[in-house]
Image: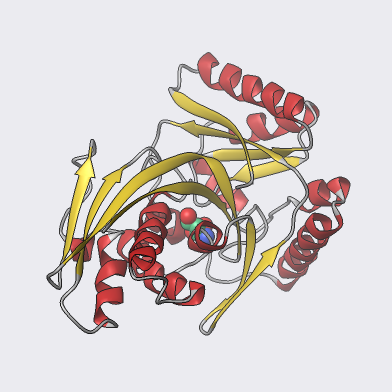
Amino acid sequence: KKIKIKAPATVANLVCGFDILGLCLSEPYDVMEVSLLDEKKVIIHNEGNSSLPTEPHLNTAGAPLLDMLNEIDGNIGFDVRILKNIKPGSGLGSSAASAAGAVVAANHLLNNKFSKPDLVRFAMSGEKVASGVKHADNIAPVIYGGTTLIRCIFPLDIVQIPAPQLYITVVHPQIEVRTADARQILRKEVQLKDAIKQWGNIAGLVAGLMKSDYDLIGRSLEDTIIEPLRSILIPEFSKIKKQCIEAGALGGGISGSGPSIFMLSKGEATAKEVEKIMQRIYNAISLHHYTYVTSIN
Ligand code: HSE
């Protein structure tokens, strides 16, 4: 038995919702092929990317599958082929795509033995391998689709947030920011006044998405806790954000732990204009980059 799936990229945090909000993109995506083995083991093949580990317990797709096998009786295992299109260290949920894609595909081969929360639980061990911390804000959108709120991870409580049509423009400058490093630079304590501002923005963003209130969505895409520290790692961050908003984007910021930057727009024409601005700014400093204009998946 064999299955081939698309494992999509994701934007975690959505600016104000550090570790609790994420959305699934239509592209880019990895292609994964998973087949059943009649032995209790996991085999990983990284097609076209030799820098990723193939030892299952060190691989972001392998670790979740080993956890899954621990909860299954009998001699079965998985052979996984991963064709990576989402660059590791891009801030677009590359590790989550592998982790979530692997468990979704495997579960399909097992006739959906496990529930979605089970799959999130398994996939989080892939994030632990990648960044040292379990977080579900990239995994949950891959498994549930659309925009998700992770109200709590222990115990898991995932809420799907309905959203209006939005276009997402993403630029990935060719520098690598490791999530573990981008978490290391964060302050461990937050001032009450900053926390209050953040709570207002998170609530505003969720309300804006649910009410299709584009202005409210735009006003709520603000982060005074994480962004000021992490944006230092991203060339031309402020310039890109400012010019994209002037061109009509609702708002945006760092995608996950960066270095990708994402912007939300109401219309496709604006999203394409935003893409041109991003390209112009990085071309001016000769920084190699990739851009995508995409939608919520
Ligand atoms: N919420 C995580 C972080 C996402 O910002 O560190 C990492 O992709």
Decide if residue 292 is on the left or right side of residue 44. Answer: right
Q: Quadrant of residue 247?
A: top right
Q: Could you tell me residue 107's position as x and y percent?
A: 37, 68
Q: Is residue 133 visible?
A: no
Q: Quadrant of residue 171?
A: top right
Q: Could you tell me residue 233's position as x and y percent?
A: 48, 42
Quadrant in the picture for the N terminus: bottom left
Task: Name the residue located 60 percent from the left edge and 66 percent from the top edge.
Answer: 20
Work out whether 56 lies above or below 119: above
Q: Could you tell me residue 273's position as x and y percent?
A: 70, 22
Decide if residue 262 is on the left or right side of residue 83. Answer: right
Q: Quadrant of residue 50?
A: top left
Work out whether 249 lies above or below 157: above
Q: Could you tell me residue 198's position as x and y percent?
A: 73, 63
Task: Name the residue located 36 percent from the left edge and 54 percent from the top edge.
Answer: 98
Q: Is residue 160 visible?
A: yes
Decide if residue 37 is on the left or right side of residue 266. Answer: left
Decide if residue 283 is on the left or right side of residue 228. Answer: left
| Of 70 and 262, the residue lying toward us | 70
